[in-house]
Amino acid sequence: MRTSEIAKRYLDYFSKHDHLVVPSASLISPNPTTLFTIAGMVPFIPYLLGEQTPPRKRMASNQKCVRTLDIDEVGKTTRHGTFFQMLGNFSFGDYFKEEAIHFAWELLTTPQSEGGYGFDPEKLWVTTYTDDEEARSIWKNEGFDPEHMQIFGMEDNFWTTGGPGPGGPCSEIYVDRGPQYGKDGGPAADETRFIEIWDLVFENYEVDNVKSKTDLHIVGELENKNIDTGAGLERLAYLMQGKENIYETDEVYPVIEEAERLSGLKYGENADADVRFRVVADHVRSALMIMSDGVRPSNVGRGYVLRRLLRRTVRSMRMLGVTDEVMPHLLPVSKNAMAPSYPELETTFHEVSESAYAEEDAFRRTLDNGTSILDVAVKKAKKEGTDPVVSGKDAFTLHDTYGFPIELTLEMAAEQGVKVDEAKFRELMNEQKSRARADALKKRHNVDLSVYDDFKKTLEAPLEFLGYTEYSSRSN
Ligand code: ATP
């Protein structure tokens, strides 16, 4: 079943159960504390908090999400994308735990020939919150095998906004991929074999004193209890399509095939190369979707995240042996794979591709200029000690003269098993800033305006990515 069909079945199912289906909101988060929309519930926050009246008490969506926090997992686990789609059904003071569990169970286990997903109930596991006896008894009444239920504490199975407000226990649904993928013993034992596909959050409490994930105070029951659920579309797709991971599903894999063609290498033959193929497929798609929602590469905020995704793509392709331009090949392939679900990509593509190709050109020049200088610095470091460290001065020269960002120096040095004296690098950067400030002072008739420059920088600085912890039940 294609990814788009899996999404359609979800939305059809909930539409049949009186949910108002709404299109995905933009990836640019409407919430000022997060750069990107990180979960299906983000556009519904005003309804969940009771600040606005929803158009209907039951709603559902397939929301585009970006989670940069998962970037280091990409390509290495089977289940983490920087971009992914989260299916969700929501109840704002309407149905609660019993229906939410029933809906999930019915959709997952109804045979595919009858419009469901056709999961074998024996392959499903659920987790519930310690005190949530009610959820366990509802699952049992649905016919769920009690041996496949596990109990987790507040850290894993209790959701809050991160501050005073609504909160409540959750129940996560997992699929067992089989003994060839790891240890027996459910999600508590092995997160590679047991894959989380759907998180049901039951918001029934008002909480305050949220000091940490495990130290909060339940004030009382909410008058309007909400349901907020999130199911990972790519995770459902890879499990239902019998693939090994989310990168091999129909909306992502064509980019791996194109990268194979460009590199002359075969996916599936070398573990390190395979990670790079998967990183490329993931990042190209994320960049495409982020740019289509209006973001352009820059040195701050979302633009910086985008820049890193594009640069990591180019570098990963270099590690696969491709030094020529890659974006003009990879980006159209990703667009063609995604456009059936997101037709607006056809309209935005001209501008998106121009900007992505220009970014690649600029980065290729940076790489061409700096790579040999970095190689010399790494060689020098290796000669000098058993625990080799690229000097702060070399890292500074790379930055200052060759435009090599420190993150790139760190990443490329680490690939060769070498550290970088970051402290010295920062010291040299600060010295340079002070010099520049002194020069500016002279030019500004001795009036020190540098304080405004600093203030401006704080406004422009990349925002710290806080939202994940605020809106997710898991600290990950
Ligand atoms: P995990 O612990 O496996 O990273 P999570 O607890 O962070 O998942 P939630 O925040 O509960 O996930 O998100 C709801 C659903 O969205 C998950 O059950 C999963 O199916 C999907 N999901 C979450 N993060 C990702 C990701 N980076 N890539 C693909 N799907 C994801």
Image (cartoon, rainbow, N blue to C red):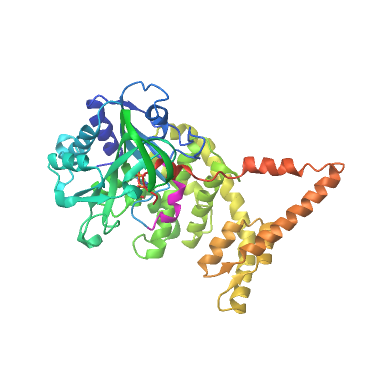
Q: Is residue 340 visible?
A: no
251 displayed left or right of 121: right
Q: Quadrant of the N terminus?
A: top left
Q: Is residue 253 visible?
A: yes
The x and y percentages for residue 102 are 19, 35
Q: Is residue 215 above or below residue 295?
A: below
Residue, far right: 445
Q: Is residue 229 above or below residue 389?
A: above
Q: Which residues are magenta?
A: 65-76
**Viewer-proximal residue among 148 and 352:** 148
**Residue 6 belongs to the span the image colors magenta:** no
The x and y percentages for residue 374 are 62, 66
**Viewer-proximal residue among 210 and 385:** 210
**Viewer-proximal residue among 265 and 315:** 315
90 displayed left or right of 105: right
Residue 118, quarter of the rendered image = top left
Q: Is residue 443 above or below residue 322?
A: above
**Residue under the point 42% across and 51% down:** 70
The x and y percentages for residue 147 are 15, 52
90 displayed left or right of 265: left
**Residue under the point 34% across and 51% down:** 79
The x and y percentages for residue 91 are 30, 29
**Residue under the point 65% across and 60% down:** 369
Q: How many marks?
A: 0
Residue 168, quarter of the rendered image = top left
